[in-house]
Image (tube, rainbow, N blue to C red):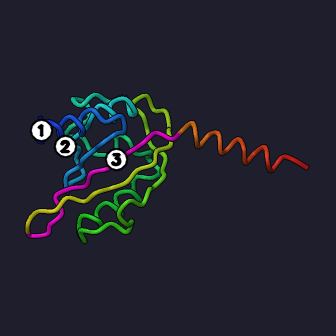
Protein backbone atom coordinates (compact mmCIF):
# COMPACT_ATOMS: atom_id res chain seq x y z
CA UNK A 1 0.00 0.00 0.00
CA UNK A 2 1.43 3.38 -1.03
CA UNK A 3 1.52 6.05 1.69
CA UNK A 4 -0.19 9.40 1.17
CA UNK A 5 2.97 11.17 -0.01
CA UNK A 6 1.89 14.65 1.16
CA UNK A 7 1.06 13.30 4.62
CA UNK A 8 4.37 11.41 4.64
CA UNK A 9 6.39 14.60 3.95
CA UNK A 10 4.41 16.67 6.44
CA UNK A 11 4.92 14.04 9.14
CA UNK A 12 8.61 13.72 8.31
CA UNK A 13 9.16 17.48 8.58
CA UNK A 14 7.00 18.08 11.66
CA UNK A 15 8.08 15.06 13.69
CA UNK A 16 11.82 14.95 12.88
CA UNK A 17 14.00 14.83 16.00
CA UNK A 18 16.37 17.40 14.47
CA UNK A 19 15.18 20.99 14.33
CA UNK A 20 13.81 22.05 10.97
CA UNK A 21 13.28 25.78 10.69
CA UNK A 22 12.21 27.78 7.65
CA UNK A 23 12.53 31.57 7.57
CA UNK A 24 11.18 33.72 4.75
CA UNK A 25 13.20 36.26 2.75
CA UNK A 26 12.65 38.80 5.54
CA UNK A 27 14.16 36.46 8.12
CA UNK A 28 10.88 35.69 9.90
CA UNK A 29 10.27 32.13 11.08
CA UNK A 30 7.49 30.46 9.09
CA UNK A 31 8.06 26.78 9.98
CA UNK A 32 9.13 25.37 13.35
CA UNK A 33 8.96 21.62 13.95
CA UNK A 34 8.89 19.52 17.11
CA UNK A 35 12.67 19.10 17.01
CA UNK A 36 13.09 22.88 17.06
CA UNK A 37 10.72 23.11 20.01
CA UNK A 38 12.66 20.42 21.88
CA UNK A 39 16.10 21.89 21.15
CA UNK A 40 15.34 25.60 21.56
CA UNK A 41 12.44 25.54 24.02
CA UNK A 42 10.08 27.81 22.06
CA UNK A 43 6.66 26.48 21.11
CA UNK A 44 5.56 27.03 17.50
CA UNK A 45 3.22 29.79 18.73
CA UNK A 46 6.18 31.57 20.34
CA UNK A 47 8.50 31.19 17.34
CA UNK A 48 6.35 31.60 14.25
CA UNK A 49 6.46 35.13 12.84
CA UNK A 50 9.49 36.05 14.97
CA UNK A 51 12.93 36.89 13.56
CA UNK A 52 15.67 34.28 13.81
CA UNK A 53 17.27 36.50 16.48
CA UNK A 54 15.40 34.46 19.11
CA UNK A 55 17.98 31.67 18.64
CA UNK A 56 21.06 33.71 17.65
CA UNK A 57 23.40 35.02 20.37
CA UNK A 58 23.47 38.82 20.27
CA UNK A 59 27.18 39.05 19.44
CA UNK A 60 26.71 36.88 16.33
CA UNK A 61 23.63 38.55 14.89
CA UNK A 62 25.38 41.07 12.63
CA UNK A 63 27.49 38.35 11.03
CA UNK A 64 24.47 36.06 10.69
CA UNK A 65 22.31 38.70 9.02
CA UNK A 66 25.09 39.77 6.63
CA UNK A 67 25.31 36.16 5.43
CA UNK A 68 21.55 35.71 5.39
CA UNK A 69 20.89 38.84 3.28
CA UNK A 70 23.67 37.89 0.87
CA UNK A 71 22.20 34.42 0.43
CA UNK A 72 18.71 35.88 -0.13
CA UNK A 73 20.10 38.45 -2.59
CA UNK A 74 22.26 36.07 -4.58
CA UNK A 75 20.12 32.96 -4.22
CA UNK A 76 23.23 30.99 -3.28
CA UNK A 77 24.92 30.12 -0.05
CA UNK A 78 28.66 30.31 0.22
CA UNK A 79 28.38 26.86 1.76
CA UNK A 80 27.95 23.96 -0.62
CA UNK A 81 25.18 21.43 -0.49
CA UNK A 82 25.60 19.34 2.60
CA UNK A 83 28.29 21.52 4.19
CA UNK A 84 27.75 21.42 7.93
CA UNK A 85 28.11 24.68 9.83
CA UNK A 86 28.80 24.74 13.57
CA UNK A 87 27.75 27.76 15.61
CA UNK A 88 26.57 28.77 19.06
CA UNK A 89 22.82 29.23 19.48
CA UNK A 90 20.40 30.29 22.21
CA UNK A 91 17.65 28.42 23.97
CA UNK A 92 14.53 30.18 25.25
CA UNK A 93 15.92 30.17 28.80
CA UNK A 94 19.07 31.99 27.61
CA UNK A 95 21.30 28.91 27.73
CA UNK A 96 23.94 28.93 25.04
CA UNK A 97 24.21 25.67 23.10
CA UNK A 98 26.28 24.42 20.18
CA UNK A 99 24.47 23.44 16.98
CA UNK A 100 25.48 22.01 13.65
CA UNK A 101 23.27 22.71 10.67
CA UNK A 102 22.80 22.65 6.93
CA UNK A 103 20.80 25.14 4.91
CA UNK A 104 18.58 24.85 1.88
CA UNK A 105 17.49 27.97 -0.06
CA UNK A 106 13.98 27.94 -1.55
CA UNK A 107 13.37 29.78 -4.83
CA UNK A 108 10.31 30.70 -6.88
CA UNK A 109 10.02 29.86 -10.58
CA UNK A 110 11.80 33.12 -11.50
CA UNK A 111 14.76 32.19 -9.30
CA UNK A 112 14.08 34.71 -6.51
CA UNK A 113 14.87 33.44 -3.02
CA UNK A 114 11.70 32.90 -1.02
CA UNK A 115 13.49 31.88 2.17
CA UNK A 116 15.92 29.48 3.77
CA UNK A 117 15.39 26.22 5.61
CA UNK A 118 17.87 24.88 8.12
CA UNK A 119 18.14 21.46 9.68
CA UNK A 120 19.88 21.77 13.05
CA UNK A 121 21.21 19.34 15.63
CA UNK A 122 22.23 20.11 19.21
CA UNK A 123 25.86 18.97 19.57
CA UNK A 124 26.56 20.68 22.89
CA UNK A 125 27.55 17.51 24.75
CA UNK A 126 29.96 16.45 21.99
CA UNK A 127 31.42 19.97 21.83
CA UNK A 128 31.96 20.01 25.62
CA UNK A 129 33.58 16.54 25.53
CA UNK A 130 36.00 17.64 22.79
CA UNK A 131 36.82 20.81 24.72
CA UNK A 132 37.57 18.76 27.85
CA UNK A 133 39.75 16.31 25.88
CA UNK A 134 41.74 19.19 24.34
CA UNK A 135 42.19 20.80 27.74
CA UNK A 136 43.35 17.50 29.26
CA UNK A 137 45.75 16.87 26.37
CA UNK A 138 47.27 20.34 26.60
CA UNK A 139 47.67 20.03 30.41
CA UNK A 140 49.82 16.91 30.15
CA UNK A 141 53.58 17.52 30.58
Instruction: Place residue 35 in its image quadrant.
Output: top left
Q: Position of residue 57 (x, y in %)?
A: 44, 45
Task: Pick whichever, 66 or 6, lies toward us.
Answer: 6
Q: In the rendered image, which residue does mark 1 sit on?
A: 2
In this rendering, the answer to whether 124 lies above or below 118 is above
Image spot of residue 83 (x, y percent): 42, 60
Asked where in the image residue 74 lies, by quadrant, the reply is bottom left
Q: CA distance from mark 1 to mark 3?
A: 27 Å
Percent x, y for residue 36? 33, 35
- Mainly helix, strand or loop, the magenta region? strand
Magenta stretch? Answer: 110-123
Of residues 56 and 41, the one nearer the viewer is 41
Task: Judge whether residue 111 is colored magenta.
Answer: yes
Say which element carries label 3: strand
Q: Secondary structure at mark 2?
A: strand
How many other residues sit within 10 Å of disc 2, few (<14), some (14-19) or many (≥20)?
some
Q: Position of residue 22 (x, y in %)?
A: 24, 47
Tag 1, which secondary structure? loop
Q: In terms of sequence position, does the residue under pointer 1 or pointer 2 come before the other?
A: 1
Q: Residues within 10 Å of mark 1 (few under 14, many from 20)?
A: few
Q: Is residue 74 above or below residue 118?
A: below
Residue that mark 2 sits on: 30
Q: Is residue 7 magenta?
A: no
Foreground: disc 3 or disc 2: 3
Amino acid sequence: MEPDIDRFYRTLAHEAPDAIIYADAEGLIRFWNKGAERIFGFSPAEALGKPLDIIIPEGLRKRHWNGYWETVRSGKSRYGAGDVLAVPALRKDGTRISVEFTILPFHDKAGRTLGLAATLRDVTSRFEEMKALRAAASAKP
